[in-house]
Image (cartoon, rainbow, N blue to C red):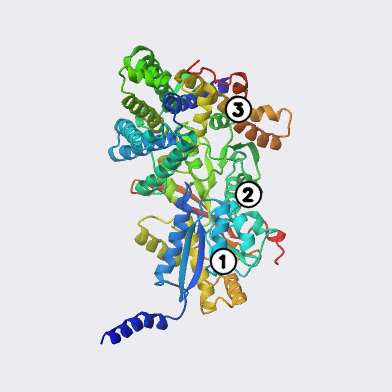
Amino acid sequence: MLLFIEQILNGLQLGVTLFLMSAGLTLVFGIMQVINLAHGSFYMIGAYVAATVTALSGSFLLGLAVALPATAVIGMLVEAIVLRRLYKKEHVDQVLATFGLIMFFNELTRIIWGRQPLFMDVPSWLSGSVELIPGIPYPSYRIAVIGVGLLVALFLYLMFTRTRIGMQIRAGASNREMAGALGINIRLLYTLVFGLGTLLAGLAGVMAGPILAVEAGMGESILILTFVVIVIGGIGSVRGAFIGALLVGMVDTLGRAFLPALFRMFLSSAHADGVAASVASMSIYILMAIILIWRPQGLLPAHS
Amino acid sequence: MKKLLVVLVVFGMFVPNVLLAVEPVKIGMVTTLSTKAGYLGEDVRDGFKLAIAQEDGMLGGVPVELLVEDDGRDPGKAKQIADRFVKRDNVKIMTGIIFSNVALAVVPKVVRGEVLYISPNAGPSDLAGKGCNENYFNVAYQNDNLDEVVGKYVSDSGFKNVYLLAPNYPAGKDHLAGFKRYYTGKISGEVYTKLGQSDYAAEISALRAAKPDAVFFFLPGGMGINFIKQYSQAGLNKTIPVFGPAFSFDERLLGAVGAAAKGVKNGSQWTHDLDNPANKQFVEAFRAAYDRTPTLYASQGYEAARLIGSALKSVGGDVTKFDQLRAAVRKADFESVRGQFAFTTNQHPVQNLYIREVVEDGKGGYTNQTLKAVFTSHGNAYVDDCKMQ
């Protein structure tokens, strides 16, 4: 039972990280109609900048404070220089161009930082573990990740429902021309939305830095999961991304954790491990297929 | 006067060529320089180049030209490059491949013709056993070696209930099989994770619940960094010791893992602190040339170059004497940075295998320290499967 609760926490933590990534991607996809494959690159940039600043200054918070505006600014520059030309183009062109951006950023990080992965540690004040429930020591840093993710979710919810800019973004999403005619600067709005999206990806990268290897190409491994999340949640919907991210995080973690034991009940041990590993890696795609059969638009589509 | 000048210039262009009529021997290196794993190929290449630089562009007194191409870890691309080396550049000696799946795609075809392939890293069981070939040599190790040494050490140290972890792909299973060959205790759990997985929280929780007395893992590259960091953050490194082959603990990865790897014992065929003159000379020269401590991959690249040098010397640089060249490689008459070195009948190393420990290097970083040789003059498990005897 204790193990089960611990695995639920693990699933929550993975889900929350995925949410930070997918919130930005779904905004850009849903509002600007751009498929941005390079979203993972901003995750990587966030991690690299934070790792570098943390190593130089010794302060994780300073690393965070530099990395967030840095990814947002780089994101807005990319929007202004590259993506702005792609809004009216086919999705294939966007995929090609943003795939090119992935290669560009991966090679750029290799040129600047070299081929070997960077080091980034958990800040000392978060390095211990906490017993949330007696008997389960859980790393404080992972609890902090869960906390930050939930705060961001709350912030986005309030921003979209309670503020003027949130209203403008929603207006721009449902009818671009009409919103423009009513005096909203759509061009500026898109740049801001894109900056917000990349900032969230950068935040996810900074949070992942101490747990994962900070290396060129680290964004691609999480990008696929992120796309699964926004498809499950409904493209363009931040609420959908939240539900989808938690679902994917849970299914992936619980599958990896408990499928081997399940398969061992009716297969020989050596065989069960291999089969369970394969089924566990398929589990989120099976989940996606089931959800799409049931609700082809995703769980909470933006324009329903 | 003008004519004279032209004649002089033309001669000026030709004279050096006439004097240097000896064409350098071309060596084709197909290796992985891009992708996340690019640093492996970089180290093999730099080790190889160091040997050439130490002889001012020669190996074994014979001028050589090293052709380096990046395979991007893609077997198809590697095949094309190898094809081009053989057909266009007329290369007789090839080396460089890092990954076993790439080697399996390239090597069998290359060695069918009159080409020697000297592997500086990948050592899949196929090429050591049924698929062995007289033109294929591995100067680094058979893949299972670094797991075998850990299996033996873990057993000898009295661990009786070990938890195993590897990615779900053929090499993952091979490496665990290598461990099990010399490990005599019980296996508490055997988990195969997704290739390229980044979050290991679920596996670590399950591992803690299984209460093993040690963990053995094979997770190359970034996967290993992720696992070790998360394992130590969960506080488990204080209670359940971790063991693995050297692939997750080379000097360049240690920089990214940091304190989380401290005290971890891992298996290797070479470490920069091995006490022999050839090694001291190599480590010093490598540090001077590249300003970093060589990894095992760098030593393997260097050894490949020196082995090729010894063979070139014995044929006086004439690679058309192909059979003599091959016989000279088989003799392995070079001063190895591993102290002693010889080939088995299936042309893989006979060498000592060591257990080493990750320690602080006194400059704020981490490095490896050799603890002891667990196997001396160790060959590989596939000698009998190979038709060459």
* SS state under label 3: helix
Question: On the same chain: label 3 and label 1?
Answer: no
For mark 3, name the chain. A
Residue B311: give x, y in percent of width and height: 54, 73
**Residue corresponding to mark 3:** A255
Residue A10 seen? no
**Residue corresponding to mark 2:** B178
Placement of B28 over or under B264, stated as above or below: below
To which quarter of the image does residue A267 belong?
top right
Is A161 or B8 nearer to us in this picture? B8
Q: Mark 3, residues whose alpha carbon is within 10 Å: few (<14), some, or many (≥20)?
A: many
**Residue corresponding to mark 1:** B86
- Mark-to-mark CA distance, 2 and 1: 34 Å
Q: Which of marks 3 and 2 is in front?
A: 3
- Tell me whether the residue at label 3 lies in contact with that at label 1, contact meaning CB atoms closer than 8 angstroms: no
Is A169 or B326 nearer to us in this picture? A169
Is A269 or A95 nearer to us in this picture? A95
Placement of B361 over or under A259, stated as above or below: below
Disc 1 residue type? Val
Disc 2 residue type? Gly
Q: In the displayed structure, does residue B267 sit left or right of residue B258?
A: right
